[in-house]
Image (spheres, rainbow, N blue to C red):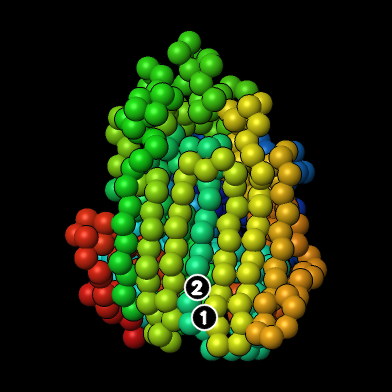
């Protein structure tokens, strides 16, 4: 919903874990002239209370809090215009659909949901209500990714034949998905859905194409009970208060991080959720090493690999075309220092702090018959996902024009999700999966 002159758009947040913090700050600090935060909803009162305390640090009064079971009542009572959904992934659809049917627009964290039936439910609600769902694919707003899209659209490499995309999560960031609810595929869809939907959306956007068929192989190789084979396992279930975790570089020390302590350690007595599980404990049902081969509506192919246990963090994208090749390489951290291993790159610090270790980015155009050209990109920063977070919230909350059409629709969210869902099915069957067999989009 675009702000009208003299009227601030009223927003409510459902799901007050760490991921909500970036949106809350953007609403009450960066875009308070056009947007207004009017309520929180969650299953856990302690987490909502923590966010209200942090609002005080920003000079903002506390907002009303509602149990998630009273979500629809909240929408009416607080006259909500837009709902921000930052809850556990598998619950997204219930809040998205309820908000749409109450006459609200929705901004939801990625992934839009976790399976095809839930995705269909959201798409049906969008058609039925005429309201809008925007998926917060912040990577579209990274200046590097915007420039890559411009170059491809301008024909810098000619007709696109193939894309190779490698993403590395280091043993600090990657490990974090195996400590928390993401380790359960029923809650997150696994990394092919929760994490890689970002990347699959970028490829759809860059190519201006839709996925047709996916063939994939994935396994749990490093985390879970495999840690014993590799010599990393410690005998504990969660890190807090456990001597066996004291020397474990994979252990998250919640008590040492004030924000995380408030959100999780101090809130445990309400819901029993442990944020600091042992990454090598039993019960992990997601993969940590995944390879994908996808074909697209244009005829182009993509090879993609996600590794969640790398020594450094970053990614490489290579686009091959009829007139040359475009290469993007981003190093977000060159290594994980022992001192930083028990800290976080993600969660409560997600996108707000660069890693202490070095990094950088290069974008190179390699045309046929000519020397390579290093492409300068203005606006790139190692903070906030390359500067993307601030640029995204300017569009979502500040009413800034969006000539690149970066705001991702429910259909875009579905297309990104479908590549990951097809990959998950291919993991199970060992066979290629046609995307149309999972969900048919108009």
- Of the 4 image quadrants, the one containing the C terminus is bottom left
Q: Report which residue position mark 1 lands on.
A: 207
**Which circle marks residue 388 in the picture?**
none
Helix, strand or loop under label 2? strand
Residue 20 image position (x, y, % from top left): 57, 49
Q: Residue at x 74, y 78 (%)?
A: 371
Quarter-of-image position of residue 92? bottom left
- Which residue is nearer to you in this view: 95 or 276? 276
Residue 135 image position (x, y, % from top left): 50, 66
- Which residue is nearer to you in this view: 151 or 17? 151
Q: Earlier in the sequence, mark 1 or mark 2?
A: 2
In the depicted structure, whether residue 87 falls above or below residue 318: above
Residue 171 visible from this viewpoint: yes
Residue 5 image position (x, y, % from top left): 74, 77
Q: Report which residue position mark 2 lands on.
A: 163
Helix, strand or loop under label 1? helix
Q: CA distance from mark 1 to mark 2?
A: 9 Å
Horizontal relation, residue 48 to residue 130: left or right: right
Task: Determine whether label 1 and label 2 are within 8 Å by CB.
Answer: yes
């Amino acid at each position: 919903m675009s702000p009208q002159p003299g009227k601030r758009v009223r927003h409510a947040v459902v799901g007050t874990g760490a991921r909500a913090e970036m949106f809350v700050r953007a609403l009450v600090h960066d875009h308070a002239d056009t947007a207004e935060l009017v309520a929180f909803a969650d299953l856990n009162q302690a987490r909502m209370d923590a966010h209200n305390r942090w609002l005080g640090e920003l000079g903002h009064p506390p907002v009303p809090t509602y149990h998630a079971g009273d979500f629809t009542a909240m929408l009416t009572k607080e006259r909500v215009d837009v709902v921000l959904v930052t809850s556990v992934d598998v619950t997204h659809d219930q809040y998205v659909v309820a908000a749409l049917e109450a006459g609200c627009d929705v901004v939801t964290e990625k992934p839009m949901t976790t399976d095809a039936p839930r995705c269909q439910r959201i798409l049906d609600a969008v058609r039925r209500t005429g309201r809008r769902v925007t998926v917060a694919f912040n990577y579209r707003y990274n200046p590097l990714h915007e420039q890559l899209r411009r170059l491809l659209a301008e024909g810098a490499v000619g007709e696109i034949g193939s894309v190779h995309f490698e993403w590395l999560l280091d043993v600090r960031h990657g490990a974090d998905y195996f400590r928390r609810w993401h380790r359960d595929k029923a809650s997150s869809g696994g990394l092919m859905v929760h994490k890689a939907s970002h990347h699959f959306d970028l490829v759809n956007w860059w190519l201006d194409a839709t996925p047709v068929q996916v063939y994939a192989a994935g396994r749990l190789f490093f985390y879970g009970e495999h840690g014993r084979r590799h010599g990393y396992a410690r005998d504990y279930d969660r890190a807090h208060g456990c001597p066996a975790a004291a020397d474990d570089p994979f252990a998250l020390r919640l008590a040492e991080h004030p924000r995380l302590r408030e959100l999780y350690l101090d809130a445990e007595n309400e819901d029993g959720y442990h944020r600091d599980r042992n990454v090598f404990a039993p019960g992990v049902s997601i993969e940590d090493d995944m390879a994908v081969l996808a074909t697209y509506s244009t005829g182009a192919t993509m090879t993609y690999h996600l590794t969640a246990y790398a020594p450094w963090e970053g990614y490489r994208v290579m686009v091959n075309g009829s007139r040359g090749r475009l290469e993007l390489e981003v190093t977000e951290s060159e290594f994980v220092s022992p001192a930083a291993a028990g800290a976080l790159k993600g969660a409560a610090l997600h996108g707000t702090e660069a890693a202490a270790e070095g990094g950088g980015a290069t974008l190179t155009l390699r045309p046929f018959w000519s020397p390579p050209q290093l492409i300068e990109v203005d606006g790139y920063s190692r903070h906030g996902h390359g500067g993307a977070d601030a640029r995204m919230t300017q569009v979502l909350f500040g009413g800034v024009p969006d000539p690149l059409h970066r705001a991702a629709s429910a259909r875009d969210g579905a297309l990104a999700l479908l590549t990951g869902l097809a990959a998950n099915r291919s993991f199970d069957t060992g066979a290629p999966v046609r995307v149309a067999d999972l969900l048919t989009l108009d």
